[in-house]
Amino acid sequence: MNSPIQRARLLILPLLLLIAAVLAFSQFDSARAQRDDLIPESDRRADLTTTQKAFLADREPNQDLPALSEVPCVGGMADIYHCKNIDLLSFMPLSSIGGGSGNDVWGWTSPEGREIALMGRSSGTAFVDVSDPVNPVYLGNLPTHSSNSSWRDIKTYADHAFIVSEAGGHGMQVFDLTTLPAATAPGLPMTFSETAHYAGVGNSHNIVINEDSGYAYLVGTNTCSGGLHFVDISTPTAPVNSGCFSSDGYTHDAQCVNYAGPDPDYAGAEICFNANEDTLTIVDVTNKAAPVQIARVGYSGSGYTHQGWLWPNHRVFVLDDELDELNFGHNTRTRYWRISDLDNPVLITFWDGPTSAIDHNQYVNGRVIYQSNYRAGLRIVKPPSRELAYFDIYPTSDSASFNGSWSNYPFFDSGTILISGIEQGLFMVKINPSTMAQAQAAPTIFD
């Protein structure tokens, strides 16, 4: 028979377990509420994609970080940031460029040679003069057209910025970049107004521009079944709706070019390479009234076909998948597609990088790939499998979570590379010149 002490223990133990469970749930509920407070109301829609929901589940408060300037990479560190063959030119925290959370980044070079960073944030677009990258100047902010959103995307054409957002009613903002003030102008930072507006869509996840054709392609919109929405921007301040491609449903991102590859059947055609959630879908958009799907190919181990970029000779397409690291547990995976025959794309190989981070946006410049891999930061890859350099803006972890580096812009003639941080801000970095010279000189298997 149990003693009184034993009976008391039997009664107390379940009570203690119940109290612990209540406390744990309370802490979880508090953390969830804190996270939910970071999510703009416009992002709480029921029709968000799988990756958007996963992204929001990982939201963190902005990091309280100091501005930095001229911090070389020494012994694998630049201040608190892990690095290899990349020096930090400067860093501007979100609080110094308009606040909100960070997202996309793009660049523009003025006719006079000024280099300007266009940094997307949940509440608008920041313009930063980075002509002197160790002393960047925040010129001002273009507020969102409608409401705040975690997703904003920016591209440029003919000295104008074109900006879309997931916020309902945002449409496409057009801003004349030649009106930006000088870095020495009085009254900085300023609040800017959009030059023109396109209301042919409500929300749009992304914008793609073919500068050779003068067309913008809005993707992930509330039109065209989420597929390519064509806009003639040859007159930037008077955008014209020019049709749709909706046959393959939602397009998450794309690259559209005047094709200059080896397939003679499409010489000179305007081709879009679409990341369509579970396939690489190639579309001939030369005739806007009658676009033609050329190919639609899936692959083993797909999670969420997210984004990619062409090799300069248009023989290879470099593709990333945003959910395969989470779903299958392998390291950051880059896939290489041979597209010398556009009707029959072939996955020729893939490479798993040195970290478990999720890949997001990547671009090709010359013979080098510039990857923004969320918590692993900016990674510079010489294909197919050599990591030349990196700059890790989320130094406490490289795990598969949606924090850290959203995107990068590696196309300035100066060699300054922009990195946008979701919780951090805007980084200006530069690869060691000898490393870059060797990388660009050495041929790859894709040349």
Image: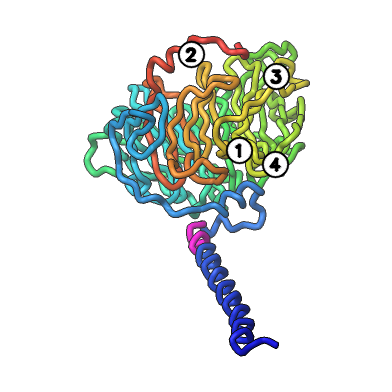
Chain-order first, disc 4 or disc 1 = 1
Part of the protein shown in magenta: 34-39
User: Residue 276 appears at what percent x and percent y?
Assistant: 69, 37
Q: CA distance from mark 2 to mark 3?
A: 22 Å
User: Residue 77 appears at what percent x and percent y?
Assistant: 36, 33
Q: CA distance from mark 2 to mark 4?
A: 36 Å
Residue named by callout 3: 339
Residue named by callout 1: 218
Q: CA distance from mark 2 to mark 1?
A: 32 Å
Residue at left offset 40%, top offset 20%: 413
Residue named by callout 4: 250
Q: Secondary structure at mark 4?
A: loop
Q: CA distance from mark 4 to mark 1?
A: 11 Å
Q: Nearer the viewer, mark 2 or mark 3?
A: 2
Chain-order first, disc 1 or disc 3 = 1
| Res 418 → quadrant | top left
Residue 440 numbered tag: 2
Q: Is residue 185 visible?
A: yes
The amino acid marked with disc number 4 is: Tyr
Q: Secondary structure at mark 2?
A: helix
Which one is nearer the viewer's eye here, 88 or 167?
A: 88
